[in-house]
Structure formats: structure tokens, C-alpha cells
Amino acid sequence: MSRDPTVPKTSTRTPATGASSVPAASSSAADISAFVAKARALATGAGGGNGRLVFALDATMSRQPTWDMACQLQADMFREAGSIGGLDIRLVYFRGLSECRASPWISDTAQLARLMAKISVVGGHTQIGRVLSETRREAVKESVRALVFVGDAMEENLDELCAKAGELGLLKVPCFMFQEGPDPVAEHAFREIARLSGGAWCRFDPGAAAQLRELLRAVAAYAAGGREALARLSQTASSARTLLTQLR
């Protein structure tokens, strides 16, 4: 995996192994028609086995503090899901000028922690569209319960992102968009992505580990046990109530 020598890195950690590059994707009218036909043919049930959650993170330069928090908090997602059923996570991250990578499906918290510890942040622009496309590809192959995205910015064409979010809505894959900080451009985009996919948006304060922990626990409960599990958690966790009221 090559890196532009002009783009600084914030640590000496090496790029993660076991993560494949996510290709850039665009949809023609024929592609979208074919996708919609396939989406309608899919079963809407969750099926057996663990719940499947795409866990996507902005790994550009401004994200170092939140990346470190997510590394520490990801075990809480597995613990929450384990109390309900189980959880398989596919980690997706973007950074640099055009790098977007996805891990295999992971069901072990230690394995995910090791993978995340190998990844360093690199300056660059957002690539949320590629995250949405990767999630769609996985959902077409096999059921995906939800996408959770953690970021603080949006620097892409909003109409294109909304089209991809709508496609995920057809597949019953809600996007949980967790925004760090007050950027109004990001908020507008994240709210639209959440709305069109049937998901939810929530903001957390910069560096607020407790807030992010509760949000991730709530999504893990949903991924493992569906709306009923999220409803049970909402009786004791305000973050779960916030997400539940937005889901359609």
C-alpha cells in the first residue's frame, strides 16, 4: 500500500494488514435499476447467525483523538451484542488522498483491537460515498443490520451521497451517523443520509468518550437484536432512546 510522501502521518504505526482496498464506485441508471430489482428480491429478515455491522471511521488527520477513543470503546460493542446474540463487524476507514479500506468480517474483539491499533491517521478529504458503496455491496451479498459512521466533516457531493443512502434504505440497512463537533455542513449531510436510509443521526462532544460509548452500545444492540433489543436498552440508556425515536 503506497502513500503520497507529501502527506504527513501522525504516528509511526504501519498500515493495517488484512484490510482490502475499497474501490471507488459510481452508479449509472442501469446499475441503479439492477440494484433496485435485486434489493426487492432480497428477504427482509435478519437470518441466522450474528448480527452484521459495518463500523466506519474517518481516519483523516483531525480524527486522531476519536480514532483512539474508538479503539478503546469497540470492545463495549461486542459485550453489548454478546448479551443479546452476537456481532460480526467489518471495519471500514478512509484517509489520505484516495485510500479507503475494509477489513474482513470480525467476530472477536481482540482481533479488531489489534487491527485498529495498526492504523494511523493521515490527512485527506472525506470519502463517505465509498463507505456507503462498500456497505451496499456487502448488504447485497448477505444481510447487514446497520452501518455506523463516526466523523466530523463532509466534503463530497451531497446529492450523490443521498442517492447511495436511499439505496441502503431499500436494503433495510439504516445508517447511524455519529457526528463529532458542530460543523453545520456535516450535520445537514449526516441527517439526510440517516433519514434516507431509515437510520438516525446524533452529535457527540469532541473527546466525549462516555457519549460515544453509549451510542456504540446502542447500535450494537440494534445490530444483534433489532429494534426490540434497542427498545429494551432505551429503558435505561438515553442514547438508545434518542436513536429509537428516529428509526422508521
Image (cartoon, rainbow, N blue to C red):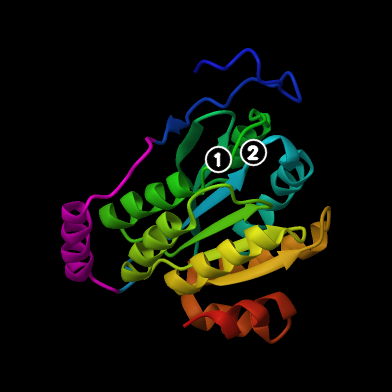
Q: Which residues are magenta?
A: 23-44
Q: Is residue 197 above or below residue 129?
A: below
Residue corresponding to mark 1 = 93
**CB under 8 Å between discs 1 and 2:** yes
Q: Nearer the viewer, residue 96 or 1?
A: 96
Q: Position of residue 201 (x, y in %)?
A: 61, 70
Q: Which residue is mark 2?
A: 59
Amino acid type assigned to the residue bearing label 2 in the image: Ala
The earlier-in-sequence mark between 1 and 2 is: 2
Left or right of 13? Residue 244 is left
- Dividing the picture into quadrants, the one containing residue 182 is bottom right
Quadrant position of residue 62: top right
Relative to 234, 225 lies left or right = left
Mark number, residue 165: none
x%, y% of residue 180? 73, 57
Question: Can you see residue 77?
Answer: yes
Residue located at (64% from left, 38% from top): 59
**Is residue 11 or residue 73 the one in the foreground?**
11
Per the image, label 2 sits on a secondary structure element best described as loop
Coordinates of residue 113 in the picture (x, y in percent): 64, 39
Q: Is disc 1 surrounded by few (<14), some (14 to 19) or many (20+) residues within 10 Å? A: many
Res. 144 image quadrant: bottom left
Q: Is residue 198 left or right of residue 109?
A: left
Say left or right for 234 vs 3.
right
